Image (cartoon, coloured by chain):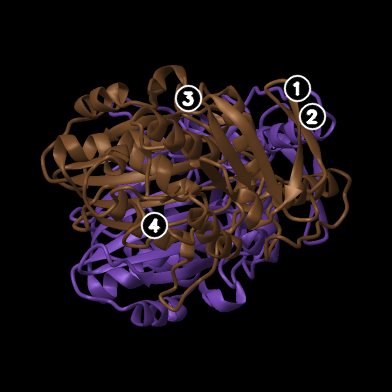
Chain colours: A brown, B purple
């Protein structure tokens, strides 16, 4: 069986660290692993499948010889380094937002649109594949089976996003603010513009002149690209909550064809990678503590929206660092290996 | 100037305590104050406008002679005790959900529909007035001016509700779970069916056979009653977040007439009791920490919803114990005093 030489760029970050763990647990045969990060993390040693590896500083020359690389180095570094990797014959699976909306870059959630990678067409033999935004991935995982069953016309989504989506520093900030509260001290904030402990911020990423944040536009545009349907209307309000891990989403869906809650539950129960947790009488519904550490997307509270002819409300939770980032990236690699695209 | 004899029923609870504070700060002339609660709180002494009062056990005989009573004793006690007070000539302003949807009981947010109290008609000379649900009050405060300007057709709302809405025990539960987390202990839960610290629960009040919670139905039905328009379609998803004080709401509105974000900001800036906080470039938007301890309703993130012809998204925050409960109840009394209805 063929073994792969794999690079991880941004190995010191919150998502990079998860990429290493997810890759380790995956069935992917790894012949060689090269870990890249900034000066700050370089030199750190870690074990992967029983062997010790050292994180190197990111030098494009060292990409040579890799089969593929998982990038989670942020938009700026990715814009600079991904082309360097591709130039050296390395397939890049990039977690940043840098390349997602490029017309010739496939934006992939394997269970939803993995097929675009093997189709002849715009994306044929793509060497750079974009991993969608965390909040988009878990949403399209449930939209896709509903879209296939009843054609989605419009989506209104409000999110409840965990601080780990802003990286390790934000996790520390919530921890520190929580401790300060318990000890009766004043809370300090550096990562977020306001206190996040025991508070809610309707603000993720930068605002633009429309009053929307970049995070909200990602949910709108990436959803249309992944579902390959620009007629799907999406509006989003993205909100940070004092949760460490696991993004939640309240999703309102209007479909073309009527889909009863029972029918929606059936198609979602059968959807790959989706776990139906929907039994309100016994308080069963997805929560961040349900999804943390899990690779699947959890859905519940599926019910008819009586305010329109063909409406549904549902509640979706996933681990933003796993299916929302690292797991999906490794699954893209797995899909390409399986289809002999790597 | 006439002075009033006022009773507070449920004076030991989270809302009852706020009612005392709000009444104290209000301009209402109080000749006599009688505080009622269960055995557990009876005997407690507290000061009100420089005088000491003792909480009594709730005995309907002692309601006699009061001009009005603010009730916050829960649905069951209210169903039993409110008629006893009314029978004795006491006007009851009730914070429970017991009477809100009764056809002959006015459901009032003074700035929105206070006029129903002085109109001849269904509610003429009402002796029992219902205070709406906390999450409904702050929503109708912003819906009303928009409805007047452009007629609202449909509302999709997702909430981010504070634990104080479940009473003092829930506040203690979040505090205890937070401490347990900081100290590395296991979190225990009694008030909520699951951990609330660093978690999110898509579950407020009881589920019914439709899959909706009572809280969600309250937002739907109370909104239609307060705005006196059953053609307004509302769907709601109500969610508990680890915040002590201040409910937030992500509200999506579809109107009959086009209303630009600029026009919406203008009507909201002019709306009584509403404070516009909407300047994203300087990170100005309402948050629970903005609203805690304040009597007003705060609105921001007002922007066009591009997914429909006449759509708006906005974000509303208010103190659930103040405008969401105690402040509104005292304002109803104040309105009735002003209009000589008491």
Choose between A59 and A240: the one closer to the eye.
A59
The residue under label 1 is: B186
Give how far apart the Cα atoms at labels 3 and 2 are: 49 Å
Point out the residue furthest to the left here: A257
A341 with respect to B19 (left or right):
left
Give how far apart the Cα atoms at labels 2 and 1 are: 6 Å
Q: Are marks 3 and 1 on the same chain?
A: no
Q: Residues within 10 Å of mark 4 (few under 14, many from 20)?
A: many
Contact between marks 2 and 1 (CB within 8 A): the answer is yes
Q: Is residue A97 above or below residue A29?
A: below
Q: Closer to us: mark 3 or mark 2?
A: 3
Q: Residue at x 16, y 43 (%)?
A: A151
Contact between marks 4 and 2 (CB within 8 A): the answer is no
Residue B232 is drawn in which quadrant? bottom left
Q: Which mark is residue A25?
A: none
Q: Earlier in the sequence, mark 4 or mark 3?
A: 3
Choose between A158 and A222: the one closer to the eye.
A222
Q: Closer to us: mark 3 or mark 1?
A: 3
Q: Which mark is residue B180?
A: 2
Q: Residues within 10 Å of mark 1 (few under 14, many from 20)?
A: few
């Amino acid at each position: 069986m063929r073994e792969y030489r794999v690079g991880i760029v941004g190995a010191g970050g919150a998502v990079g660290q998860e990429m290493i763990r997810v890759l380790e647990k995956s069935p992917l045969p790894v012949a060689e692993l090269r870990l890249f990060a900034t000066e700050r993390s370089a030199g750190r040693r870690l074990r992967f499948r029983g062997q010790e590896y050292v994180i190197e500083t990111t030098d494009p020359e060292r990409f040579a010889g890799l089969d593929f690389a998982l990038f989670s180095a942020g938009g700026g570094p990715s814009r600079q380094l991904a082309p360097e990797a591709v130039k050296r014959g390395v397939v890049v699976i990039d977690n940043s937002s840098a390349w997602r909306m490029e017309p010739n870059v496939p934006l992939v959630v394997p269970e939803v649109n993995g097929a675009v990678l093997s189709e002849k067409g715009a994306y044929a033999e793509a060497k750079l594949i974009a991993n969608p935004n965390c909040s988009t991935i878990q949403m399209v995982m449930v939209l896709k089976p509903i879209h296939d069953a009843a054609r989605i016309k419009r989506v209104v989504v409000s999110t409840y996003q965990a601080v780990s989506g802003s990286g390790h520093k934000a996790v520390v900030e919530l921890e520190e603010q929580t401790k300060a509260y318990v000890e009766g001290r004043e809370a300090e904030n550096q990562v977020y513009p306001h206190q996040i402990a025991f508070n809610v911020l309707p603000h993720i990423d930068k605002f633009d002149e429309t009053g929307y944040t970049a995070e909200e536009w990602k949910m709108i545009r990436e959803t249309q690209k992944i579902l390959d349907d620009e007629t799907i209307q999406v509006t989003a309000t993205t909100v940070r909550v004092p949760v460490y891990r696991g993004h939640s989403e309240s999703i309102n869906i209007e479909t073309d064809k009527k889909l009863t809650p029972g029918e929606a539950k059936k198609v979602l129960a059968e959807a790959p990678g989706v776990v139906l947790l929907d039994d309100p009488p016994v308080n069963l519904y997805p929560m961040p503590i349900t999804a943390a550490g899990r690779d699947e997307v959890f859905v519940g509270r599926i019910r008819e929206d009586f305010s329109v002819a063909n409406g549904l409300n549902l509640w979706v939770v996933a681990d933003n660092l796993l299916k929302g980032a690292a797991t999906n990236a490794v699954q893209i690699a797995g899909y390409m290996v399986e289809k002999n695209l790597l």
